Image: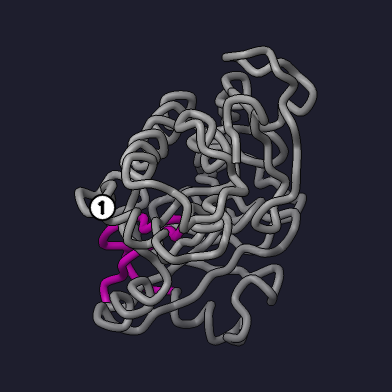
Amino acid sequence: MVEGGLIDQVEVTDARWVAPASVKAFEKKLVGRRVLRLGRRGKYFVAELDDGSALVMHLRMTGNLLYIPEGDPVPEAHLRGQIWLASGGSLAFTDPRRFGTAELISTPDALQDYLGARLGPEPFDEFFDGPYLYTRTHGRKTPIKAVLLDQRVVAGVGNIYADEALFRARVAPQRRAARVTRAQAELLTETVQDALNAGIDAKGASIDDFRDAYGVKGSFQDQFLVHRREGLPCPECDTPVKKIRCAGRGTYYCPACQKN
């Protein structure tokens, strides 16, 4: 559908999406290119192109990358850019908060350097295990939740999944990372994967703006154990779930099950 497709037209409707590149230069470089492969690394979408360059897009907090079949209406609200394929259909990038980005990386080596400087292993990589996480927490004064959200430690864990993983592991989000034991680090690697698998099975969580590539809402929000459940009973002990500010994010946890 998109892989193998020839890019026929590009329109950037919000210059901030491609900044600091100029809109005209960005559009010109994409038109006429063929998409060889689509992939993902952490929270980055990567479209490898036939000239060796790559289009890298990051959704940030509220971005959506939608496939629009030919003839279907394009969502005008918060549209930041659109890419048309010669075979029909298009990709539309929408983003209410305008944090999402699009960038052209010139070569495969430059792409590897770009992603390598920003991202650690994927949560399902064999490298993401208890010993690895323990080495990345050992000696750190920051809260363990901040470590899980650090994309250079593990790529792709967001606020929701950090809360859900920490609850599953019975680790307080505000616990200093240096106080996380080897056993807790081992368990956390497993609960991160468990929370992500649950989210994947539910096709994501549609709290505000998230949709899948076809515009369909996910249902993981109906399965949250603690996230967004402030004041509601903990599913394990009935203690009211508490909301705090941790690692700069709204954070939910059970003060009885997750003692600091």
Percent x, y for residue 41?
36, 58
Residue at image point 65% right, 18% down: 234
Magenta span covers which residues?
A: 31-51
Q: Which residue is mark 1?
A: 131
Percent x, y for residue 136?
37, 62
Q: Is residue 38 visible?
A: no
Task: Give the camera-side residue of 201 and 57.
Answer: 201
Residue at image point 57% right, 86% down: 21
Q: Quadrant of the C terminus?
A: top right
Judged by its main secondary structure, the magenta piece is: strand
Task: Give the camera-side residue of 155 and 131.
Answer: 131
> In the rendered structure, does residue 217 fall within the stretch colored magenta?
no
Percent x, y for residue 242?
74, 32
Specify the quadrant of the image occupied by residue 229.
top right
Residue at image point 71% right, 70% down: 14
Is residue 12 placed above or below 79 in the rendered structure? below
> In the rendered structure, does residue 41 fall within the stretch colored magenta?
yes
Amino acid type at image mark 1: Pro
Left or right: 174 as drawn, with respect to 36: right
Specify the quadrant of the image occupied by residue 112.
bottom left
Specify the quadrant of the image occupied by residue 113.
bottom left
Secondary structure at numbered mark 1:
helix
Is residue 233 placed above or below 181 in the rendered structure? above
Percent x, y for residue 258?
58, 32
Left or right: 14 as drawn, with respect to 102: right
- Packing grade of label 1 (10 A; few <14, some 14-19, many >=20) is some
